[in-house]
Amino acid sequence: MKAIILLGAPGAGKGTLAEGVRTATEYIHISTGDMLRTAVKAGTPTGLEAKSYMEAGELVPDEVILRIVGERLAQGNPDDKYMFDGFPRTLEQARALDATLEKLSAAVNQVFLLEVPTPVIVSRLSGRRICKGCGAVYHVTNIPPKVADVCDQCGGALYQRPDDSEETVLNRLEVYERQTASLIDFYDRKGVLVRVNAGTTPQEATAEMLSKLA
């Protein structure tokens, strides 16, 4: 069993690169959000426990998330390859994930740090616009609508999410850097950190990542 991690700030393109790697390789894309929803829908004991936190509007504890991750990995085959997208987020989660993988005679093989200059991330996120009608996503520069502030698909009004404002994006980046500094150092010391220039086009960043994939 192999495991890789995509680590990057909001707007670094983790989801896009994960899809590119999944398409080009045999890696199975692991999203903790998807696993949580699946466990809740299936009504597993851990899923029901997670549901109680979610319904109360509370964050699901690391212990529960790690249990769901462990249950998902235990269902796989010894030759499976897994790709974690944006998880772990903290040093505590990273250590717990190592312990979970160790029980399965596996380990984190590579951690891809997606590096993007702050101005690029601010531009990516603050330029995002979403249709109030159908939810289609646009970007004022990269994917502009044919008519300003009007959805091409349904004619609905486009809006900027509050957490996509420039001020909020900068705050989110500050939180990310504060939260992940120790995590980056942790994986760097283990010799599994791989830096990828994700400030380029999705195609270029995916190609670079694939070339560095062991």
Image (cartoon, rainbow, N blue to C red):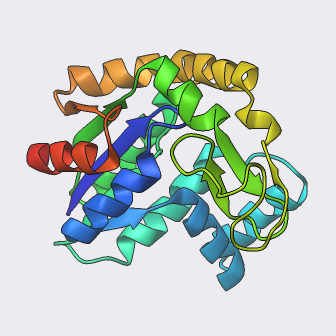
Q: Identify the residue at image location x=61%, y=36%.
A: 125
- Please, is residue 122 above or below residue 130 in the view? above
Image location (x, y in percent) of residue 199: 35, 31
Image location (x, y in percent) of residue 61: 68, 46
Q: Is residue 22 left or right of residue 131?
A: left
Number of on-image labels: 0
Q: Residue furthest front?
A: 147
In the picture, residue 10 is in which quadrant? top right
Image quadrant in which the N terminus is located: bottom left
In the picture, residue 37 is in which quadrant? bottom right
Res. 108 visible in picture: no
Image location (x, y in percent) of residue 44: 65, 78
Q: Identify the residue at image location x=78%, y=42%.
A: 160
Res. 101 visible in picture: yes
Image location (x, y in percent) of residue 40: 70, 74
Q: Identify the residue at image location x=16%, y=72%.
A: 79
Q: Is residue 195 left or right of residue 62?
A: left
Q: Identify the residue at image location x=28%, y=39%.
A: 111
In the picture, residue 99 is in which quadrant? top left
